[in-house]
Image (cartoon, rainbow, N blue to C red):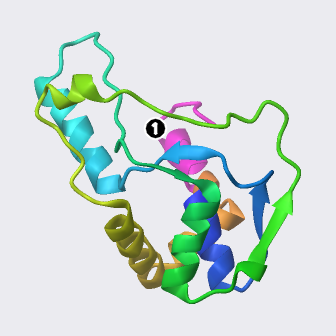
Amino acid sequence: EKYIPLVIHNALRNKQIPLYGDGMNVRDWLYVEDNCEALDVVFHKGISGEVYNIGAGFELTNVAVIKRVFKILKKDMSLISYVKDRPGHDRRYALTISKIKRLGWRPRTSFDRGIKKTIQWYLQNKQWLQNTQTGEYRRFYKKYYSLLGLKRF
């Protein structure tokens, strides 16, 4: 139910996409495979108890992300529905990633390449995308944790 899956899912269905405030909230966007590689580097090279920020060092506004998705999917900006911003909504999320870079890790996937790969994955896995919207994945995890005897959900 996060931002990029919601944008892709709604755009594919020609459904309105809510955009908080003026859409100028800034986030540091990192491709999922780069994130996994960073976790692996921290696991193998990091010092136990230390904190390592993982980010791309590439910031975009929320509205810029929508525009890039729309360009790939050939959608019109009229799908954006500006909604009142949440109280206390952070204007910018940013990380200093110099510490993890000292372990030898760097993000390898540009935002544009990563968003294209993400969209392609969702096009090939439409049921997964649907499940993120219906909450089906929550039911799966509740059952999974229950089978393990854990009370996570």
In the image, residue 137 lies at what x, y percent? Answer: 58, 58
Q: Residue at x 62, y 56 (%)?
A: 62
In the image, residue 22 lies at what x, y percent? Answer: 77, 54
> Which of these two is toward me, 21 or 128?
21
Which quadrant holds the N terminus? bottom right
Residue 42 visible in this rendered orientation of the protein:
yes
In the image, residue 103 lies at what x, y percent? Answer: 13, 27
Residue 2 visible in this rendered orientation of the protein:
no
Q: Which residue lies most toward the bottom here?
A: 74
Q: Which residue lies most toward the top here?
A: 49
> In the picture shown, does residue 10 fall above or below 2?
below
Q: Residue at x 19, y 42 (%)?
A: 106
**Which segment is the magenta one?**
140-153
> Which of these two is toward me, 91 or 86?
91
Q: Which residue is mark 1?
A: 148
SS at badge 1: loop
Which image quadrant for residue 67?
bottom right
Which image quadrant for residue 46?
top left
Question: On the picture, is 90 further left or further right than 27?
Answer: right
In the image, residue 129 lies at what x, y percent? Answer: 56, 71
> In the picture shown, does residue 45 fall above or below 79?
above
> In the picture shown, does residue 81 fall above or below 123?
above
